[in-house]
Image (cartoon, grey):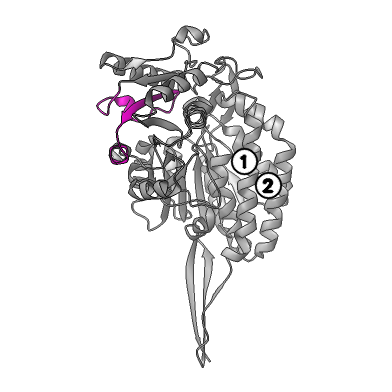
Amino acid sequence: MSSIQQTFSPIDGSLVVERAHATDHQIAEVLQKARFTQVTWKKVPISERVAICRRFIEIMRGRKDVLGEEITRQMGRPIRYTPNEINGMSDRVAYMCEIAEETLATIELPAISGFKRFIRREPLGVVFSIAPWNYPYLTAVNSVIPAILAGNTVILKHSHQTPLCAERIGEGLAQAGLPDGVFQYLHLTYHDTDRIIRSPEVNYVAFTGSVSAGHSVTHSAADKFIGLGLELGGKDPAYVRADANLTFAAENLVDGAFFNSGQSCCGIERIYVHSDLYEDFVKEAVSVTNEYVLGDPLNPITTLGPLVKLSAANFVRQQIEEAELAGAKLLIDESRFPNSVLETPYLAPQILVDVDHSMSVMRDESFGPVVGIMRVESDEEAIRLMNDSEFGLTASVWTTDMDAAIRIGDEIETGTVFMNRCDYLDPALAWTGVKDTGRGCTLSKIGYEHLTRPKSFHLRS
């Protein structure tokens, strides 16, 4: 008999859904079906694969309100925002559909008398995607849909916090006409997840999650020569230069820090502000933060919901407490947020000043509604501090000088450089990171390179 997986809502601790973990027999069947279905799926013209994925977009858009409420109940993001995740997911799918035929086309080489030469982009085979709860549709489709478009079959293991999202993706793809076996999902234990990674049927693993879990995935795959896509932790910085639009920067950086209760891999977790703007920026950031409404995420007026679980909230509380004991100053009066209650996942947003990199809150991933702000005197100091991190997913520069943003961006150790925006993903750009943020790439034309392999033809007449 299989064990049971239960999902409890951070809203009130109620049971949202429970599912039986897959049995050994079910896992073996799914792996076998994925392997054998892939042989025929890769022969389906790319135009037909694209048409199916475009129909999938329309189906999911038509259900966005229902799907949005499910997201809210499973992981706690305010319902005023969750339907928009389906829109964002659809935009990513649409772009990857748009570029699929050109990007996956055979590469024809210049003719040489007596020879024909070309390079095909072969699908890898079976892709095992392990998706997180914080953006359950956006993160999943980053690997799932491009893998399908490239001619692979996919097995999705979603977070135990958001299992319904895997089921809804499956329903949408089936309704769109995707052949049986091209996409499958499983509810799995840690042990069985490890076993699937090690199985000979799996040719690529796409994982989004913590650094420690990323090490586990890497260890599980160590005896196989397969590709790994790992999007792991982040401690994304922002630098506000002396020439920045102060009000615009403060509004957008506060949103970048606190949207989704700070539970975003590319959320803003540390801010460096030039001394010329520092005092005014801090005042503006506090003013914007005090406008948030913390409460029941099913209430349309709520702009800040609970963290996903009590332990996550307590980790952030501990970071704040340790920083304060070390000399940091807390600028947000928690009494303005009466729903922020100890021993619950509901946590008021917090801004800290008088911080430094000896403090966990400026060094370790918080993944919650807290941000530290430091004064800097120059671009060089800001660059040094931004690079003083084990992570490197995104970094943003706030300035009116694009040349300066490019110059600074060239010096920052990061996967993406933003100017005057943050906490955003453009599917036309490679989504990648450096250092402990992981390896590999999703989306963009480059993302397809990680889901295919080159196969060269050298033909002599």
Element assignment for label 1: helix
Q: Quadrant of residue 75?
A: top right
Task: Answer whether residue 37 is visible to the viewer in this image.
Answer: no
- Between 412 and 380, the residue placed more toward the observer is 380
Horizontal and vertical percent position of residue 154: 56, 50
Please rate how many residues cluster around mark 2, counting C-alpha atoms within 10 Å: few if below 14, some from 14 to 19, many from 20.
Answer: many
Q: Which residue is mark 2?
A: 173
Residue at the spot 53% in from the left edge and 27% down from the top edge: 260
- Does 217 sit left or right of 444 as displayed? left
- Between 85 and 50, the residue placed more toward the observer is 85
82 in relation to 144, above or below: above
- Between 52 and 175, the residue placed more toward the observer is 52
Q: CA distance from mark 2 to mark 1?
A: 17 Å
Horizontal and vertical percent position of residue 71: 61, 29
Q: Which residue is mark 1?
A: 88
Residue at the spot 43% in from the left edge and 25% down from the top edge: 281
Amino acid carrying label 2: it is Leu
Amino acid carrying label 1: it is Gly
Task: Answer whether residue 80 is visible to the viewer in this image.
Answer: yes
163 in relation to 451, above or below: above
Find the magenta span and give its range: 355-384
